[in-house]
Image (cartoon, rainbow, N blue to C red):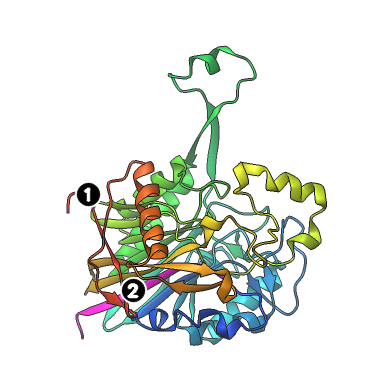
Amino acid sequence: MSDEWTLGAVGDIFLNRSDPQAAFAHVGDLLHAPTILFGNCEGAFTDSPTIAPSAGFRVVSGLSNGAHLGAAGFDVMAAANNHIVDAGHEGLIDTLDLLSAQNIAVCGAGRDRAEATRPAVLDMRGLKIAFLSYTMIIQAGYDARPGVPGCAYLRVHTVPYFPDWDCWGRLEPGALPHMRTFAYPEDKATFRNAVAAARETADVVVVSMHWGDSRLPVVLTDYEIELGHTAIDSGADMVFGHHHHFMKAVEVYRGKPIFYGMGHFVFDLIGLEAVLNAQSIANLGGFSNGYGIYPRVESPGFPFHADARMTMYLSLTMRGSDIAGIHIVPCLIDPAQNNRPVPLSLDDTAGQRVADYLRTITKAVGFDTVFAEDGPLIGGYRSLRVLGPST
């Protein structure tokens, strides 16, 4: 058994384009570099979609769009998210079958709750690598239940409050409150037990979480930190976060990395202009200081703020079951390249912008993570080396 191996990871993956095979043209060397490659499947692939009544904008495309994910390099994908049931239960099953046919293991969704919450376990060079995936963001009816398809779901309380320093808010009726969030205690216990059970049988435990406030960059909710720490405390070796449409902070907690938001990697969202009227588009355009999701003339197929184009390829060097190195290759979803991810050099302006963005958003939420620019070459690109505050 070779002792050293690599785990690669990227953020949201959803293809809806005429040339899905070409979507990863610029990152092929990166995606085929690791021993195991992970991504988040952020939508349904089916040729027979049904309408999920509670769905918002449906993230659904044909089977041909997801038919090349195995060839692209993916070995395991998370499917616990707020779009995986957008095409109904049949569309979910089609997606699971499509990935399975490409030998891509799936965690976080299934034909019933037992399957959705069961870890995907990969056997690799004598090691067992377990992947768990949960979402805290779902439409009504998307959660897996006994005998009902869906995704693994953890409930979160949202509580308005006024902190001690907000004396005016505590005095003035109608003042806008602050919000605190925390996991339901019983769901937190279930989650803790699931991670601990995976730890008992696997050499490495990876947890994927679909969480947070997608309306704004930078900010982290209370429950993200609560559950991220719970995952590590219960035996996880790393946590990958999704849902935000932006990269979020990186924390090294008890020597283990928590990537609160991996961002997009390839995420095609077309057709918003066909389902939104002019007033809705105007409202969304002014929402959250321009960070809302709405059709943008300058950005066809990618209706997100320009900051959402900054993304990453993550590489974890493993020595047996131990993390020996955490490295990031900055990438950009380039409109000039048909919204395809392009790796960036740390020696040019675009690469430095992504690196500085990671530093800024991480510091803004109070983490002391270090992003050193002396990482190894990965796919021909110099990487950032991620270090904990005490390293």
Q: Is residue 189 visible?
A: yes
State which mark lies toward you, 2 or 1.
Answer: 1
Query: Residue visible at 77% across and 65% down?
Result: 51
Which dot marks residue 235?
none
Which dot marks residue 389?
1
Q: Is residue 9 left or right of residue 87?
A: left
Query: Residue visible at 36% across and 61% down?
Result: 352
Q: Is residue 77 left or right of residue 201?
A: right
Q: Between residue 218 and residue 99, name the one nearer to us.
A: 218
> Is the stretch drawn in magenta largely helix, strand or loop?
strand
**Quadrant location of residue 82?**
bottom right
Task: Name which residue type carries label 1.
Answer: Pro
**Horizontal and vertical percent for residue 388?**
23, 53
Range covered by the magenta-colored residues:
1-14
Query: Residue visible at 42% across and 54% down?
Result: 260
Which dot marks residue 7?
2
**Horizontal and vertical percent for residue 298?**
66, 62
Count the labels in the image. 2
Q: Is residue 245 visible?
A: no
Give the position of the C terminus as an image quadrant: bottom left
**Horizontal and vertical percent for residue 46?**
69, 77
Task: Name which residue type carries label 2.
Answer: Leu
Q: Are marks 2 and 1 in contact (CB under 8 Å)?
A: no
Q: Is residue 168 above or below residue 290?
A: above
Asked if residue 24 is among those painted magenta in the image, a careful observer would answer no
Gap in Å between the C-alphas at discs 2 and 1? 23 Å
Q: Is residue 101 above or below residue 82?
A: below
